[in-house]
Amino acid sequence: MILRLLALLAALLPAPAYAWWEYGHETTARVAERQMSPRARAEVARLLRAAPSLATPTCPLRTLADASVWPDCIKRLSPRWAYAFSWHYQNVDICRPFDLKAACRDGNCVSAQVDRQAKLLGDRRLPARERLEALAFLTHFVGDLHTPLHAGDKGDLGGNRQRTSYGIVTGARLNLHTVWDGYLAERAISTAPADATGLLAGYSPAERDTMALGTTEDWSRESWAVARDFAYATALGGEPCKAAVGKLDDKAIEALIAPTRLQIVRGGLRLARLLDEALNSPSPSP
């Protein structure tokens, strides 16, 4: 009973405006750290030494985990990075056939920015400051792309307008976006075997290699399907496009732990691949 009351109190607190909140993004980064090559890991450490040049002391950049939340932290420093606000998501309609182009005009969406930031990170002609910024954006945006309600919605601002209950917490104070970004993500990651090491332990090396494959469009379609088939469908009784207050009871929450963990592992493995590709390339000729 005490644990339920504590969970209720936590759920009623204001939610940070973070995709996957800090725990999800940092865990994605730690999954990547365990999978990336030693050379890429050394390059990340070298780039992080350029952090003072970005002049964001309230948003530190000491580790890859710090980098994973830096793009959310700097939102408080607007208008300096206000141009990047739309880069964190892509509202692809789950009630229509998958259409990434319509949701990603002019490259101002998360999947296009994953591709763009990976190219900037791999360009050794750029100063360390610019490549470090690209590293932080890339790390964060790969996490965002694997957050289902940053990849698909039904005209409700990524589930922010979809009220839902979560266990004993009623839908009057919660929305589906907050549930998936925060409470469900934290529940899934902390379920044993917990954290990055525990999440990776559930997959063989061959399975990890297979999960790392694909393009940002492939990953976008996959996350869009998770939004439709798990996020909305589970909350709305199997009818993802129904207009109603959602309900996630304890049984539904338990069923969502595995797909949530899988999304974080996918994000971490794919981030590791992108970092290897960008940072293991030889320096360009003069």
Image: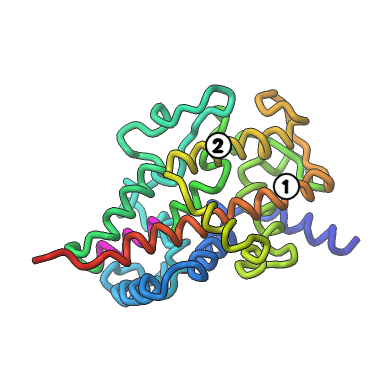
- Who comes first in sequence, dot 2 or dot 1? 2
Residue 121 or residue 173, whichever sits in front: 121
Residue 276, quarter of picture = bottom left
* Residue, disc 1: 256
Task: Classify 157 as above or below 58.
Answer: above
- Judged left or right of residue 131, residue 212 is right
Q: Which residues are magenta?
A: 129-138
Residue 15 in magenta stretch: no
Q: Main secondary structure of the magenta part?
A: helix
Closer to the camera in the image, 231 or 70: 231
Whether 130 is among the magenta residues is yes
Residue at the image point whose x is 84% and y is 59% from the top: 5
Amino acid type indicated by mark 1: Leu
Q: Quadrant of the N terminus?
A: bottom right
Disc 2 crowd rating (10 Å Cα; few below 14, some 14-19, many 20+) is many
Where residue 243 sits: x, y (%)? 69, 24
What residue is shown at x 35% (from left), y 48% (from top)? 115
User: How far, Cα to Cα, is label 2 from label 1?
Assistant: 16 Å
Q: Position of residue 279 (x, y in %)?
A: 32, 65
Q: Residue shown at 34%/31% (left/top)?
A: 105
